[in-house]
Amino acid sequence: MRISSADIIVTSPSRNFVTLKIVTEDGVVGWGDATLNGRELAVASYLSEHVLPLLIGRDAHRIEDTWQFLYRSAYWRRGPVTMAAIAAVDMALWDIKGKVAGLPLYQLLGGASRVGLHTYGHASGRDLPELFDSVRATLEEGHRSVRIQTSIPGVRAVYGVASQAQSTGERYDYEPAGRGSQPAEEDWDTGAYLRHLPTVFEAVRNEFGSELPLLHDGHHRMTPLQAARLGRSLEPYDLFWLEDCTPAENQRALEVVRRNTITPLAIGEVFNTIWDFQHLIQAQLIDYVRAASTHFGGVSPLKKVMDFAAQYQIKSGFHGPTDVSPIGFAAQVHVGLAIHNFGIQEYMLHSSLTESVFDQGMTFVDGFLHPSDRPGLGVEVDEEAAAAFPYQRAYLPFNRLPDGTMHDW
Ligand code: CS2
Ligand code: MG
């Protein structure tokens, strides 16, 4: 079954998305997500200039061979742009295979291992009353686990706090990458953060009890020792995980953290390949794999890294922000349903505008997320609707320390 055409759709319903459409000679359509937040057009151009011409005439059924061809033949491997491009092709081909087979993707991956996926949602606030309201709203949405982010006294604007500075009127989660020609500047003070955060978790535990699973995202901002100290000071509050506590480049940092705390660790939303996880998994330095199908080369490598992680009792916690499109999100929901070592799924809910372009058939009932039972990924794109939302330049914010030093994400 040959590929007869391949096209890129760039659309911005609430936020930018890059979508690949592959069509076979007998008219089967496959969709893939190639969205790289803040650098979207680089992937669109990588695909249209270098990859799409290679796809025409290839056998759409040869998913693994096509993946290896795009990965190995380029000579320069890996990196977020390359891997988001390969991810889109991989997803689109799995979508096609599912449609031809008449089966949802999870059935091709071994079938369901559970009734549905437990999710976590985001809660945040400038102060405790606002945070508590946000936790309640997150629970009302159906999540049974909650990520807690908070303002820090004396620090003007902190990433991940919905009601702060760059909020645009729409729900913050929809567009943390602010539209405009320059990124927003935020503040950071690690000392103040390390002092304040345990007091917030203590208050949340007092308000919501000991059973609610709580998570926190450190956004790569600590040194190894700072992260170890935070992990230890949060132990009384029994976190489900502490995410991205140190910058991902220095993997040995996790050894320091691990030696000093039993707070579970999740990492890897900015990782691109299984090799980024190799040491962390083998040395058992993490508990959850945070990869996202879209930034990790697609469905095929996501399944492989989880099978590798399974040997070490490490579970999935796939990255599920709104900058992963409904297509990329569906791809990893199928993987999560099929694998044995599923942990939890981050679920931020796309805006109604996004859903007017991407028709997703998944369900979220009684705290369980279930992929669509339509054949393939189960997401269809309304191209006419997409055309009404042209690309808008957008950047994630960055942050500086109190003395003006540029700091880590
Ligand atoms: C965050 C993301 O979801 C998360 O855990 O780290 O919101 C992240 O900041 C964005 O996906 C960046 O594009
Ligand atoms: Mg994160």
Image (cartoon, helix red, strand yellow):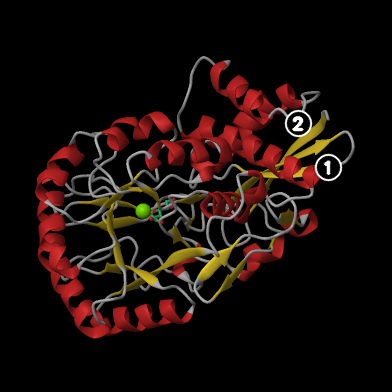
Report the amino acid beneath label 1: Val
Residue 12 lies in quadrant: bottom right
The residue sitting at the right extreme is 26
Horizontal and vertical percent position of residue 193: 16, 62
Q: Earlier in the sequence, mark 1 or mark 2?
A: 1
Q: Is residue 288 visible?
A: yes
Q: Is residue 398 left or right of residue 60?
A: left
Q: Residue at x 20, y 41 (%)?
A: 254
Whether the residues at callouts 1 and 2 have beta carbons within 8 Å, the answer is yes
Q: Residue at x 37, y 79 (%)?
A: 134
Q: Is mark 2 within 8 Å of ligand 1?
A: no
Camera-nearest residue between 57 and 402: 57
Camera-nearest residue between 149 and 208: 208
Report the amino acid beneath label 2: Ala
Q: Residue at x 43, y 44 (%)?
A: 291
Q: Residue at x 71, y 49 (%)?
A: 376
Horizontal and vertical percent position of residue 29: 79, 44
Figure check: 279 above or below 153 = above
Horizontal and vertical percent position of residue 227: 16, 50
Horizontal and vertical percent position of residue 80: 47, 35
Q: Which residue is mark 2?
A: 60
Camera-nearest residue between 333 and 57: 333
Q: Secondary structure at mark 2?
A: loop
Q: Residues within 10 Å of mark 1 (few under 14, many from 20)?
A: some
Q: Which residue is mark 1?
A: 28
